[in-house]
Amino acid sequence: MIAGLSMVDVAWLVMALLVAGGVTGFLAGLFGVGGGAVLVPVLYELFRVTGVPDDVRMPLCVGTSLAIIIPTSIRSYRAHRATRTVDSSVLRNWAVPVVAGVVLGSLIARYAPAELFKIVFVVIAGISAIRLLFGRDSWRFANDLPGGAVLRGYGVLIGVLSTLMGIGGGQLSNIFMTFYGRPIHQAIATSSGLGVLISIPGALGYIYAGWPAAAANPGVGALQFPFALGYVSLIASLIVMPTSIFTAPMGVRLAHKMPKRKLEIAFGLFLLLISARFVASLF
């Protein structure tokens, strides 16, 4: 028995995490995201099976997702950069504001109720899906990205929301960049770099945010999942990471072969499906 599970249950859990890792890496490369949009709902179901309490299950999913995103995002970003479609100037302007947003999001996570994480996930993913599925090229704020304080303000907002959703920021920055006239392929490639800026401080922030909750549950492997630090499950991270790293370049190759509209529809449908799942979990 491990954490109250039989060896058969543990075997199924490990297999599910390996599959989740493969899907996460592929989507990270395909859509320029860290993969958290698929990881969070998958981890939510797996942690439910292992008996993680409701009040800490969602933040544990988010924190673990951010930890897993670290190597996946690095792998995805390096692959996209090799295609020379990454706008490095945008990443330079966003570096400090995004990290500041991550720190703020981690502080919110320490005190926020579990429902807040789900609501943020549903609202942002739903808006993103509508923009991708039904939006037109005429739906723009401007023909090019803003500069100065406006661009930095977007960076802070992306950092905060991404930290609360457990994503690498690609989902938000993709939509933002396309609203300012950037091609979807360039938006995806550039967004892949945000995962590195968000995932590392975000994971550290969730270790800090979850420390009181873990300390309040001694003897159950930190929140009834073995080998956890705060809101980050180390065992889930170590199982998912290898397959996600392996499959990320496959998604990158497919992304640069797909037509613009097919890529938008695929991403939009994916986000809509995930939104519906969390709406159901709120009731």
Image (cartoon, rainbow, N blue to C red):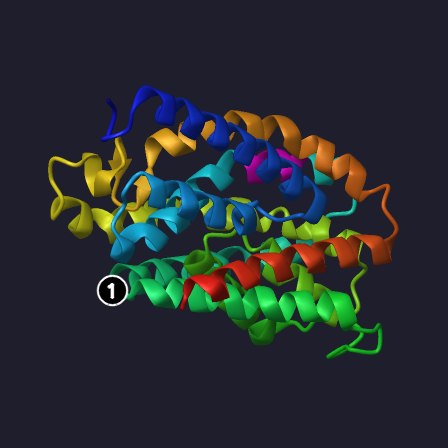
- Reply yes or no: does residue 92 show up in magenta: no
Q: Quadrant of the N terminus?
A: top left
How many numbered discs? 1
Q: Is residue 220 left or right of residue 278?
A: left
Identify the magenta region. 72-78
Q: Amino acid at mark 1?
A: Tyr
As drawn, 90 above or below 256 = below
Q: Is residue 215 left or right of residue 178?
A: left
| Residue holding disc 1 | 111
Q: Is residue 37 visible?
A: yes
Q: Nearer the viewer, residue 157 or 135?
A: 135
Residue for point 48% across, 64% down: 280
Residue for point 41% across, 22% down: 11
Residue for point 65% across, 34% down: 248
Within 10 Å of disc 1 (Cα), the crowding (few <14, some 14-19, many 20+) is: few
- Reply yes or no: does residue 73 show up in magenta: yes
Q: Is residue 41 left or right of residue 189?
A: left
As drawn, 34 above or below 74 = below
Q: Is residue 152 visible?
A: no
Q: Main secondary structure of the magenta part?
A: helix
As drawn, 143 above or below 158 = below
